[in-house]
Amino acid sequence: MVSMWRRLLGGRNKAASRARRIPAAKPPGAAAAAPAAEPTAAPEDLRPAVSATQIRARFLQYVFGLPDSGSQQPNTFELTTLRRLELLSIRFDMRSLPRLPTVLPQLMRLLKNDNAAGNQWARLVGRDPLMVGEVMRVTRSASYRSAQPIRSLQHAVILLGQEGLRRVLTQHVMKPILQSSAGRLSQLAGERLWEHSERCAHACAWLSKHDGCDAFEAYLAGIVSHAGTGAVVRLLDQLMPEAPVALSTDFFAGCAALAARLSVQAAQYWDLPANVIEALAARQLSDQPDDGPPLATALACADVLAMAQLLGENDLLAADLDLRHAWPDTYAASLLARCQQDLRRQFAGARGTMA
């Protein structure tokens, strides 16, 4: 537990140190002469009104359905709960999580092959009745409705296309897992985690295109990024039969650190692609986007962008919050602005629906 708090506090110091290294920007219209005497704008002038750390805390408050106490430091009850939560998480049995369909690893490999044919996809999908039902349901929806009625599974997967099939299968597999919780806290949390996962997956795939990452792996990383948060919520159900009035920011940070570790363990249990596990593992060690491989970078930024989008939709954050300058050493401001615009186009006013 001590190491976890050291990691959290160390992360804050590291972020502050990095911020101090950002060169100050010249104000518009400053004279070119006598550069040493020019006034400079502090880096804070470009930062968003709400920091990534604050967004993460507000997101967990929203997921847990619990208010913020307004305090940074945890009280005695919270410290005791975090210690008990740490012990429970160490003994958490990953076998209690639903197993992924046995055909999913084969489908993942096949869907990365651009030369695979529709009949190959259909044969694999056809081995799982639930996947068949989901593919047929989606292709018969208004978004995919065609002039000709869909009479076969092969016709359906061809209509979806490679990208559409990837998303349908990923969502079909992960949605019930993230929503499978039961209990006072986790019943509501499952739906909210899923809403975030959709947005995070979309943003991660969007950003990953500029990092040379595999789009499907990026989408999958976004979907499973908070699998461990669902596990933490279930554990909190055991520890807090009566909901507390409010919780501190550091309590939520402690829960997030435990959730990150459990997300890695869940990904390993599900035998997800090595790049996805590596990205989740890098996120466990640091919340800073530039710490880790390219997919971890995309995931770190996408996670916060998705949180901000979801909180904005629920009037818990400004819907037009500008995060262009949240990570000046990682992505260009124009790129992050386009990613935020894309998220708003895809999800604003369409909560809980599949893109």
Image (tube, helix red, strand yellow):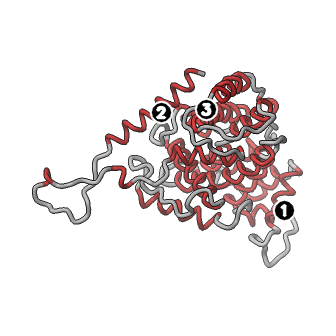
Kindly identify the amino acid type of the residue bearing the numbered disc 3. Answer: Gly
> Which quadrant holds residue 81?
top right
Image quadrant containing the N terminus: top right
Badge 3 vs badge 1, beta-carbon distance below 8 Å: no
Q: Identify the mark at residue 30; answer none if there is no mark.
A: none
The residue that appears at 48% across and 49% down in the rendered structure is 211
Instruction: Quadrant for the C terminus, please.
Output: bottom right
Mark sitting earlier along the chain (3/2): 2
Task: Give the image location of residue 53, x and y in percent.
Answer: 52, 43
Choose top left, top right, bottom left or bottom right for residue 308. Answer: bottom right
Report the residue at 71% width, 41% height from top: 245
Query: Of residues 123 and 296, which is closer to you in this image?
Result: 296
Identify the residue position indicated by label 2 in the image: 11
User: Do the numbered discs 2 and 1 sit on residues whose CB atoms are within 8 Å?
Assistant: no
Can the viewer see residue 278 in this picture? no
Report the mark closest to the observer, 3 or 1. Answer: 3
Q: Nearer the viewer, mark 2 or mark 1?
A: 2
State whether residue 335 is above or below residue 95.
below
For disc 1, the marked residue is 136
Q: Say which element carries label 1.
A: helix
Residue type for callout 1: Met
Which amino acid type is shown beneath numbered disc 2? Gly
Label 2: element kind: helix
- For this view, does 48 lie left or right of residue 176? left
For residue 290, above or below residue 212? above
Tag 3 residue: 254
Q: Spatial distance from mark 2 to mark 1, Cα to Cα?
A: 46 Å
Residue 74: image x %, image y %?
60, 31
